[in-house]
């Protein structure tokens, strides 16, 4: 997509304040202009307060000097030295006219930068459950935002598709021909493994056969992986998650590289023997007694586990995929695991300083009782059931609001709003916090919900359909209504919100932004008639509606949420 970057008003004002600082006090050149959106004016700068001491003057005096040299908008002084900056109506309309171009004037600041996003990663032969909700939704949102900003995003689904449990499962399926979901067979095989020592022996031999590449055993394993993956991809398709089979690079892929990876660590003197096992002791992460925490590189029985696989994975990814940034989206409980993996990879020279790496950690999904989310029977909640419940509730709420909908339309909108509600509730919570899964709150038309955003979008789309205009133009000489002003400033903040998400890896910033935009939009719809307005006000308002709808639609899409035309 060819896009022309439009510099946000915030950046324009910041630039002007920086210039004023440099010209009035050359010794302060380069200082942060400290400009932000404000209730008192369009923007406010704190620079005079922050810099007065360094300049050896009173804040109010520095503010006066800055105000007299500022070349943007009109400036008023307030408080002990705030600069309140209000832009002219013409500048605001001109900015909107510029954003009418392709891509809403959002640039591609991340072009040429490759990011690997490791997310979702469910385990084969188990169903996706509530524990995979956040990684799937957060990872997908980050992948979308980085790509929208021009980044080269490589998605990786690190499926749990290898391990001794498969020997057990395959042995059980051979001995007890029955068709049941893998989950159940898996539980049954574990029970028999614990109860029957001969069976346990046969399972161990089966693990050896699998690892040695015995064709019949491998074929069984492949069937299991294929069937599980199909189920995962059915859920991804329903949820609108970008992951495709091509993104699946499971643990088994790294199996042939484990021995080499370990040999590298031994040769470098990084891995050391400990009770018959091989471990890497951390230099930074200490246990409760101040002892260095070990990363398990090879178990005493000679086997390799999760730690070794992640070491081989990071080594492979940096070498073969040449990323600038590596992201791992998993829950906060894996923080220590990744800290140890990253540290070992740096020491081994696999991860140069030029490559950024981050564990994108998140909190837990809780039930309304504040405890880990479970079914009434105390089981983990299957992802499908959770989504079904939200869709059913959304259906009720949408039908109440809009009783005339045809059943097929209602079904479609219920699916879009129910899934959107789940995603939005997840993404809008600060990532590292736990949150309670509260379906009623999620599907509400009021408050900071996905449904509220979708409704605001549908409302503006309905105005646009009635207006019938296909091209949009803005007359910059029209006076700006205060509610329009708030909306213009909100629309203009889109790229700033996105670059913040990319920098902090916190999708809730995009949610907060879109919520503000939707509120500004709702106020605009209530206070500023569009279709009944006289020209040229009407054309300007239609252009504003068009920009609002496009920004809401793109924003929702970046959250992975559908934007229905009507609801
Ligand atoms: N399969 C793991 C789980 O379900 C998550 C894997 C995350 N990615 C990784 N590279 N370790 O907990």
Image (cartoon, rainbow, N blue to C red):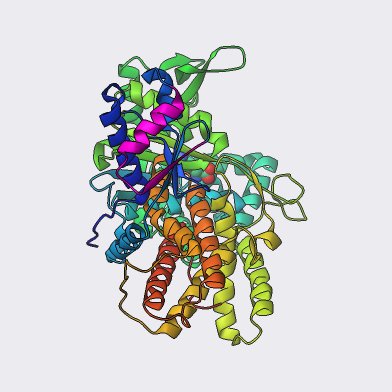
Residue 156 visible in the shown view: no
User: Residue 101 in the image: x percent, y percent?
Assistant: 27, 65
Residue 148 x %, y %? 33, 55
Q: Is any atom of residue 384 visible in this view?
A: yes
Residue 252, by quadrant, is top left
Residue at x 47%, y 24% (from the top left corner): 295
Q: In which quarter of the image is the N terminus?
A: bottom left
Task: Pinpoint residue 87: horizontal percent, then vertical percent.
Answer: 38, 52
Q: Nearer the viewer, residue 425 or 218?
A: 425
Q: Which of 108 and 213 is in front in this view?
A: 108
- Say which residue appears at 52% left-offset and 47% top-offset: 40
Q: Is residue 136 left or right of residue 269?
A: right
Which residues, given as a range, are shown in magenta?
Answer: 58-78
Query: Looking at the image, which is closer to me, 270 or 343?
Result: 343
Count the marks.
0
Q: In this view, does 287 lie above or below 477?
A: above
In the image, residue 519 above or below residue 536:
above
Assess whether residue 307 is covered by the magenta stretch: no
Q: In this view, does 440 lie above or below 122?
A: below
Where in the figure is residue 107, as x and y percent of width and height?
28, 53
Q: Vertical placement of 484 versus 130: above or below?
A: below
């Amino acid at each position: 997509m060819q896009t022309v970057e439009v510099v946000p008003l915030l950046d324009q004002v910041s630039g002007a304040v920086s210039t004023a600082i440099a010209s009035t006090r050359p010794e302060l050149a380069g200082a942060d202009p400290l400009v932000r959106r404000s209730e008192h004016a369009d923007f406010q700068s704190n620079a005079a307060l922050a810099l007065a001491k360094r300049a050896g003057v009173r804040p109010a005096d520095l503010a006066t000097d800055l105000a007299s040299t500022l070349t943007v908008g009109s400036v008023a002084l307030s408080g002990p030295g705030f600069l309140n900056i209000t832009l002219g109506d013409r500048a605001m309309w001109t900015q909107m006219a510029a954003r009418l171009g392709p891509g809403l004037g959002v640039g591609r600041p991340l072009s040429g930068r490759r990011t690997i996003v490791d997310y979702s990663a469910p385990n084969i032969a188990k169903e996706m459950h509530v524990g995979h909700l956040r990684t799937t939704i957060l990872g997908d949102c980050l992948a979308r935002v980085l790509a929208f900003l021009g980044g080269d995003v490589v998605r990786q689904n690190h499926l749990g598709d290898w391990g001794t449990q498969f020997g057990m499962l395959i042995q059980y399926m051979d001995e007890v021909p029955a068709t049941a979901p893998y989950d159940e067979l898996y539980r049954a095989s574990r029970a028999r493994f614990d109860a029957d020592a001969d069976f346990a022996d046969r399972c161990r031999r089966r693990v050896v056969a699998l690892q040695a590449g015995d064709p019949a055993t491998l074929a069984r394993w492949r069937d299991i992986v294929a069937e599980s993956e199909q189920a995962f991809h059915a859920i991804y398709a329903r949820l609108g998650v970008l992951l495709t089979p091509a993104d699946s690079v499971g643990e088994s892929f790294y199996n042939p590289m484990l021995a080499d990876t370990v040999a590298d660590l031994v040769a470098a003197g990084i891995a050391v023997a400990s009770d018959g096992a091989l471990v890497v002791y951390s230099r930074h992460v200490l246990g409760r007694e101040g002892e260095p925490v070990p990363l398990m590189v090879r178990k005493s029985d000679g086997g390799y586990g999760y730690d070794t696989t992640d070491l081989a994975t990071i080594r492979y990814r940096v070498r073969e995929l040449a990323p600038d940034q590596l992201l791992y989206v998993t829950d906060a409980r894996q923080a220590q695991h990744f800290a140890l993996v990253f540290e070992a990879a740096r020491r081994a020279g696999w991860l140069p300083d030029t490559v950024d790496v981050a564990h994108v950690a998140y909190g837990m999904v809780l039930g309304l009782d504040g405890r880990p989310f479970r079914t009434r029977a105390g089981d983990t909640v299957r992802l499908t059931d959770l989504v079904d419940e939200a869709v059913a509730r959304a259906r009720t709420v949408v039908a109440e609001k809009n009783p005339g909908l045809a059943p097929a339309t209602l079904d479609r909108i219920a699916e879009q709003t129910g899934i959107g509600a789940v995603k939005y509730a997840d993404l809008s919570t600060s990532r590292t916090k736990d949150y309670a899964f509260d379906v009623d709150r999620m599907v509400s038309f009021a408050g900071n919900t996905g449904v509220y955003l979708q409704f605001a979008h549908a409302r503006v789309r309905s105005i646009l359909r009635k207006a019938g205009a296909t091209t949009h133009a803005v007359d910059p000489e029209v006076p700006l209504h205060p509610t329009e002003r708030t909306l213009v400033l909100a629309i203009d903040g889109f790229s700033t919100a996105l670059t913040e998400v990319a920098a902090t890896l916190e999708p809730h910033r995009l949610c907060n932004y879109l919520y503000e935009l939707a509120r500004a939009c709702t106020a605009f719809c209530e206070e500023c008639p569009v279709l009944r307005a006289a020209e040229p006000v009407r054309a300007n308002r239609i252009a504003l509606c068009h920009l609002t709808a496009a920004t809401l639609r793109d924003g929702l899409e970046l959250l992975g949420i559908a934007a229905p035309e009507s609801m």
